[in-house]
Image (tube, rainbow, N blue to C red):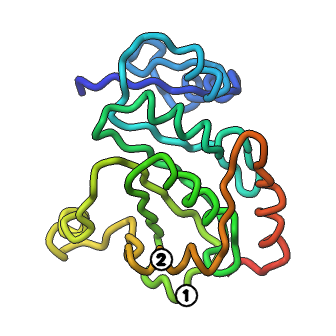
Amino acid sequence: PRSSNEVVEIDPAVTEVAYEELGLPRRTSIKTYNLDARLFLIQRKTGDRYHVVVGDVFNDYSTPYHLTTLEFDRLIKANLEPDGIYLVNIIDNYKYGRYMPSIIHTLQQTFNYVYLFGTLDSWDHAGTSTFVLAATDRRIDLADYQQFATEDGRKKAAGNPHEETRLTRYLTEREPILLTDDHAPTDILVARILGKARS
């Protein structure tokens, strides 16, 4: 209840929907800025740092490439507390896609730890889905996470973490590329899975 939240939403109409249709009070601790996320961070001069940044900008296969690059990741980190965490949701095909592996690889150049979470029970049968990446300089004990998220096994966790050692092998097999402002072929990486059936 005492937290402060800043939302950066590029479309003012979406903000109005939150007020008019979803019941968000106009006077609230949630402050909304109608700007591009990268431009907002470039112009931000408060010196305050975030504990959590959530990147929820990917619309199915539509990709704002300038929010996937090494330079943007560095901008995020510069605005995070030392133990802060950057969460990104992304849609890709786990088996065939090269988009998510490239984003993970790029995040790994800035953050000490990058974790992959999915909603599937088994990574062996993962196909096209929504995944969450967690990038941070603070190690997350995934066993502790599982215990907390499942309330000691009494509940099913909403997010299933990918095994760390297997993630390294997964990335190597998919030959990820480093996404930079000068080279971010995200549309080409996404196109690879358009011909694959959703599974």
The residue that appears at 42% across and 54% down in the rendered structure is 134
Residue 130 found in image quarter:
bottom right
Q: Earlier in the sequence, mark 1 or mark 2?
A: 2
Residue 56 found in image quarter:
top right
* Residue 50, position as x, y percentages in the image: 37, 29
Q: Identify the residue under disc 1.
A: 125
Of the pair 57 and 48, the residue shown nearer to us:
48
On the rendered image, what quadrant is the N terminus found in?
Answer: top left
Of the pair 157 and 109, the residue shown nearer to us:
109
* Residue 84, position as x, y percentages in the image: 33, 39
* Residue 68, position as x, y percentages in the image: 65, 46
Of the pair 39 and 195, the residue shown nearer to us:
39
Q: Identify the residue under disc 2.
A: 120
Residue 149 found in image quarter:
bottom left
Q: Secondary structure at mark 2?
A: loop
The residue that appears at 47% across and 74% down in the rendered structure is 167
Q: Secondary structure at mark 1?
A: helix
Of the pair 147 and 13, the residue shown nearer to us:
147
Along the horizontal axis of the image, is 55 left or right of 165?
right
Along the horizontal axis of the image, is 178 left or right of 62?
left
* Residue 144, position as x, y percentages in the image: 18, 65
| Amino acid bearing label 2 | Leu
Along the horizontal axis of the image, is 122 left or right of 185?
left
Mark number, residue 104 = none
Q: Is residue 36 above or below residue 144?
A: above
The residue that appears at 41% across and 73% down in the rendered structure is 162
